[in-house]
Amino acid sequence: MLSRKVIVTCCSLFCVLSIFTYAQSTAVNLDEMYAYPLGFSVDISSYSPVVALGTDFDYTFSVNDFSAKATYPLPQHPVWQPYLSLGLISYTSTDTENEAQADQFNHNQAYLSGGISYLTKMSKQMEIGVSTGLGLSQSYFSELGGSTDTVGQMNLLADLNGHLGLNVSYNLHLAFEPRIRYTKTFGLLERFNGVTFGVGFTGQYRLGEDPDSPKAEIKSIRFLDGKISNIFAALQSFYVNNSIGSVAFVNEDKFPITNVEVSFYQAGFMDTPTLLKSFDKIDSKEEQSLDIFAAYNTRVFETAGITPLTGELVVAYTSRGRSYTQKLPLTYDMYDKEALSWDDTRKAAAFVTPADSALRNYSSYVRQISRERNITGYSEEMQTAMQIYYGLKELGLIYQLDPTSPFDQAQENTGVIDAVSIPRNTLKRLTGDCDDLSVLYSSLLESAGVETAFVTVPGHIYVAFNTTVPSRDYQLLHPSQKMSINIKNQLWVPVEVTMVGTDDFLTAWRTGIQQFTSLDSNPDQREIINIRQSQQTYRAVGLQETDLGLQYGDSQTVARNFSRDVNQVINEIIQSYSTIAEETNNKSGFNRLGIVSAMFRRYSEAEQAFNRALALDRNFLSARINLANVYFQRNEYQNALRILHAVEKEYIASGREQSRSLQIVLLNISRCYYSLENFDMAEDYLARLKELNPDLANQNSYLAAQNGSRASRGGADSGVLFVEED
């Protein structure tokens, strides 16, 4: 029989240990970390003497409970643990004064009960909690009333227990439990009804593996699928935001996992893992599918040929309060920076490298040696394209078919891996197929500030560039409107650059436009890929710049070939205007011919055209103003002033002082005086212009300077304004 003093002492110890272990709790969820799947225990309990309620039953008994219990912690909430218990309760009289009478009430109760416990870990070794349960028991009295027959009755049991446990190991658990039991009989013998109080001791064996043991590392994640496609070093920057593969996985644990981070890492080619996605929580049995991205470093550009790689898909997470990491190896091939598949033609933009210093230096050189032969008024972009074309021709660049992966085969079969040479390598090797030469030519033009595009037709790729000439002014580019492509109201010119080793620029231009227009009836078979727009997705490949040691060739040959072609085009343009003027014999036609001729510095032809217009109408003031402009451009300032002052008087005499043409006259008079270093007169006429057109005057404010220089004026032909029609 357990004394009241022992019971009170045990309860006090229970409370003290509970407070102590609670104070040692941590942020780690120990209940989840050390959860077990199933437990089996043996319980021994001793209760205080029974006091029958509402009777004069004064005998005392020793009450002992022996039971076996199975416990099942709920997987999602392991602190809640339903249990099923099978036991035997023994009632033995301890009354020495009325021993004979009391012994007849000795009996046993076999019972089955079930309930639920709430147990939480205050540390890895200590648990605390409560449990409650209900059960049925069957009493067996063998000596009741002096009879030798066994009699019994059914009883209801209700239990409320405290729990203070010690985990000797993950699998072995010992516990002390203060207990209260209420018993209610269904029979006539009510002497044992009521409440009993006692303590119990439990020994439990728990199934499962200690998560702290090396064998028991938790692997909540099961990878369902993972793959990476072959990648190309040239597209290094593209893979930062575009998928190289995919992975799928599931949380197979009974518990949710939290703080999940999924990343991809490639040793040797990444500075840090590339984070794919973060999750606050992934529930049990929940599946996730992710795209794989990769932030490769510049070492990918140092690879050669095909490099087999094995990367790691890394999932870091927290399970049951502890951090874990699982990895999935993924194998794939990396192709070097000169490899490409043509599933997306925009990828070719990655090989265009206008920032390459070798290319910038070469394009600058070619433009410098041709500068004196440039034609003012003609598209600067067109002239740059001609100069670079002839620079490459002088270097000896030639077209050579790629025997291993021709463009036409790679275009038809996107699974074929094509080799596209880096521009600096093509410039050094001086041979290449259509994609190599197109990439080189585009890179050189872009390095000179000319906007370019790739044009693809079945089996072929070549280059087009933006002349920046408005589509309405196509005749200032070429007499035929069909010699250019209208893209957003600007004229683009295609060039068949593979002809650089055999033909002149004008032939390459005509061939490019013929290849393009031949598909007018089937435009879906051609494509224009703007380089600058494409490089927003496929940035230029990284380079290790070194001196190429190029021999630039004969500069005079480059300049001479360029001058021949540009003058031929301009001759054709002027001839087209001349033909129109002659056929119409119209003053406006000759005036327009003169303006175009003057724009191209053909001053003699311009003078003749304006005089032809004046021969048709001596009072045609527009032609007179334009003729004065020609004299100004030829530095014949006095002749220009003679005409301009005469025109000025006519405008004033006719009351047309608000005319736009008079404003141009005043500006040109000011320029003539400025060029003659008569700064006072230049300033006076600029002041008159300012009264009529402040904006135009402010644009030419240098004319008010008293000590101007040729450099500040920009030259005699700078900013001349011609008049189409008054």
Image: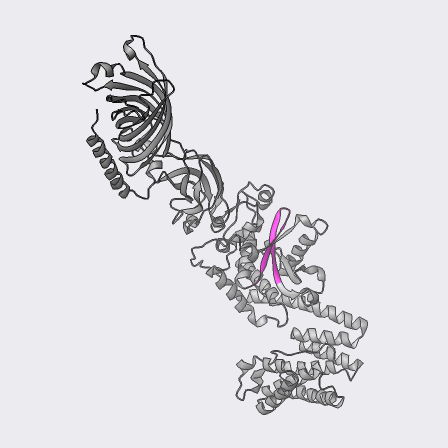
Residue 552 seen anywhere in this rendered image of the structure: no
The range drawn in magenta is 449-466
Q: Is residue 146 above or below residue 324?
A: above
Residue 511: image quadrant is bottom right
Q: Is residue 81 above or below residue 603?
A: above
Which residue sits furthest left? 96
The stretch drawn in magenta includes residue 69: no
Q: Is residue 656 above or below residue 364?
A: below
Measured as percent of width and height from the top left, residue 156 is found at 37, 23
Classified by dominant secondary structure, the portion drawn in magenta counts as: strand
Q: Residue at x 41, y 39 (%)?
A: 257
Relative to 76, is 370 on the left or the right? Answer: right
Relative to 65, is 221 on the left or the right? Answer: right
Q: Is residue 547 above or below residue 456?
A: below
Measured as percent of width and height from the top left, residue 498 is found at 59, 53
Measured as percent of width and height from the top left, residue 676 is found at 59, 88
Q: Residue at x 36, y 36 (%)?
A: 32
